[in-house]
């Protein structure tokens, strides 16, 4: 069977390859005194709050399971619009909000609508690997620009301007970012967008961790800049609905009909049950639970990052959001006599029974020296992981 060049060009998602190895070893450790601690997958240990679960059950009971409009339920689009106003002070009309089958579908639709074969899209190195694959699936090419800790591992306006050429179509940013948990300062984001807009390009911003910001300086939506920015968001992270596969994007008015046409053909509509459930996310009782859980994520960060630094697993930039720690493992590798974060990840898995993600997925510049920890696990799990790491590294 002949496999398409497009499919062959997409690398494996190494996060999941490592996860499979960790799961296999974890099975053998499940009933021992040292079961595997999983700090490798970016999935909240919390699930959807009671009102959301009840809304889903009610939708099934009442037969609200048939197709919705391709753009999603208008009531849900209006709830999201209200949330932008109350949470961020941003005026985002419901007519510009497109409900999607997860943020992945939103990114796929955006790339299909805006990228032509041969177009280049500038992205930071490190960055989430699937984002660049959405670009390549649309026939474009992701161009990774190396970043530094001084830049918060994010692009700058100067780097965007310097890298821009006749093939450049725009930028794809993430704020806060996976794997670093760092955000772009709003002033710098504004400057980046000015550079892009002056060249007739597009600014796409992945904001799926935005509501998990811990610093008001950074916890601002890019949609406050102007109406030409395309923002991607999700019910997975802050709203804890990972497996429900529901997200949204905000697009300029002139793109709404284009997105509708593409969505009709590629997805028909997002999950009807998930949409009805998501309406309950915005009830005051649910928001109170989400905010309490956000505080818990911050407490985990505040414990875990200093602990890593004390162990020689240096985190160069304190994450201001999300639930990740991007740690330099060079010193630890030297101590253990191994080379690079890929081998280090398997060493931790085998000897400390702690599963982490090596930097290989996230870019090519310095990622061989970094590992990503997920702090989406419980405080007890993080404390256990730190104790095991201390035994191995000190």
Image: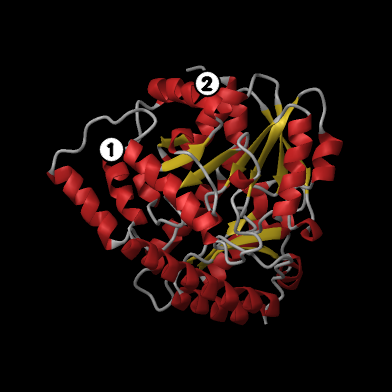
Is residue 225 in view?
yes
Foreground: disc 1 or disc 2? 1
Q: Position of residue 43 (x, y in %)?
A: 45, 57
x, y percent for residue 61? 13, 45
Earlier in the chain: of badge 1 and badge 2, it is 2
Q: Nearer the viewer, residue 19 or 257?
A: 257
Q: Are marks 1 and 2 in contact (CB under 8 Å)?
A: no
Of helix, strand and loop, which one carries label 1?
Answer: helix
- Numbered label tally: 2
Image coordinates of residue 377 in percent, x first then y, are 46, 67
Residue at 43 percent of width and 42 percent of height:
247
Q: Is residue 29 left or right of residue 207?
A: left
Using the image, determine if residue 81 lies above or below residue 166: below
Label placed on residue 390:
none
- Badge 1 crowding class, 10 Å Cα cut-off, few under 14, some 14 to 19, many 20 or more, is many
Q: Which residue is mark 1?
A: 272
Tell me the quarter of the image containing the C terminus. Answer: bottom right
Mark number for residue 3? 2
Work out whether 54 lies above or below 275.
Answer: below
Identify the element where label 2 is drawn.
Answer: loop
Q: Quadrant of residue 140?
A: top right
> Looking at the image, can residue 7 be seen?
no
Label 2 environment density (alpha carbons within 10 Å; few <14, some 14–19, many ≥20) = few
Front in this rendered view, residue 230 or 314: 230
Q: Residue at x 47, y 22 (%)?
A: 257
- What is the spatial separation of the Cα atoms under label 1 and label 2, in whole angstroms? 33 Å
Q: Residue at x 33, y 49 (%)?
A: 278
Q: Is residue 372 above or below residue 390?
A: above
Q: Is residue 204 left or right of residue 100?
A: right
Residue 306 at what x, y percent from top left? Answer: 65, 78
């Amino acid at each position: 069977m002949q496999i398409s060049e497009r499919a062959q060009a997409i690398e494996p998602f190494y996060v999941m390859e490592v996860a499979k190895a960790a799961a296999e070893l974890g099975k053998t450790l499940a009933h021992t005194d040292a079961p595997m601690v999983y700090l490798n997958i970016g999935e909240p240990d919390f699930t959807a709050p009671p009102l959301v679960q009840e809304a889903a059950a009610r939708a099934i009971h009442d037969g609200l399971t048939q197709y919705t409009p391709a753009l999603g339920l208008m009531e849900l689009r209006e709830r999201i619009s209200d949330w932008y106003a109350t949470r961020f002070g941003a005026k985002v009309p419901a007519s510009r909000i497109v409900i999607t089958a997860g943020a992945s579908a939103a990114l796929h639709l955006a790339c299909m609508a805006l990228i032509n074969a041969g177009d280049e899209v500038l992205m930071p190195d490190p960055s989430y690997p699937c984002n660049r694959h959405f670009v390549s699936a649309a026939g474009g090419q992701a161009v990774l620009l190396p970043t530094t800790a001084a830049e918060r591992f994010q692009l700058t306006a100067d780097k965007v301007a310097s890298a821009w050429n006749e093939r450049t179509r725009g930028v794809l940013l993430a704020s806060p970012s996976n794997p670093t948990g760092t955000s772009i300062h709003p002033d710098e984001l504004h400057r980046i967008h000015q550079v892009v807009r002056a060249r007739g390009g597009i600014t796409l911003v992945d904001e799926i961790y935005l509501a998990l910001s811990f610093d008001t300086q950074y916890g601002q939506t890019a949609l406050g800049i102007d109406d030409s920015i395309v923002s991607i968001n999700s019910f997975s992270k802050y709203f804890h609905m990972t497996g429900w596969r529901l997200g949204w994007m905000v697009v300029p008015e002139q793109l709404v009909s284009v997105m509708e046409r593409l969505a009709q053909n590629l997805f028909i509509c997002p999950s009807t049950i998930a949409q009805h459930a998501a309406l309950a996310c915005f009830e005051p009782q649910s928001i109170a639970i989400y905010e309490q859980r956000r505080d818990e994520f911050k407490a985990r960060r505040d414990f875990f990052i200093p602990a890593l630094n004390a162990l020689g697993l240096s985190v160069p930039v304190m994450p201001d959001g999300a639930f990740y720690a991007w740690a330099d493992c060079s010193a630890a590798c030297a101590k253990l006599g191994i080379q690079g974060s890929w081998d280090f990840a398997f060493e931790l898995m085998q000897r400390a029974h702690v599963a982490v993600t090596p930097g290989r997925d996230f870019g090519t510049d310095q990622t061989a020296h970094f590992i990503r920890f997920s702090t989406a696990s419980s405080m007890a799990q993080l404390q256990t992981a730190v104790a095991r790491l201390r035994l191995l590294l000190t």
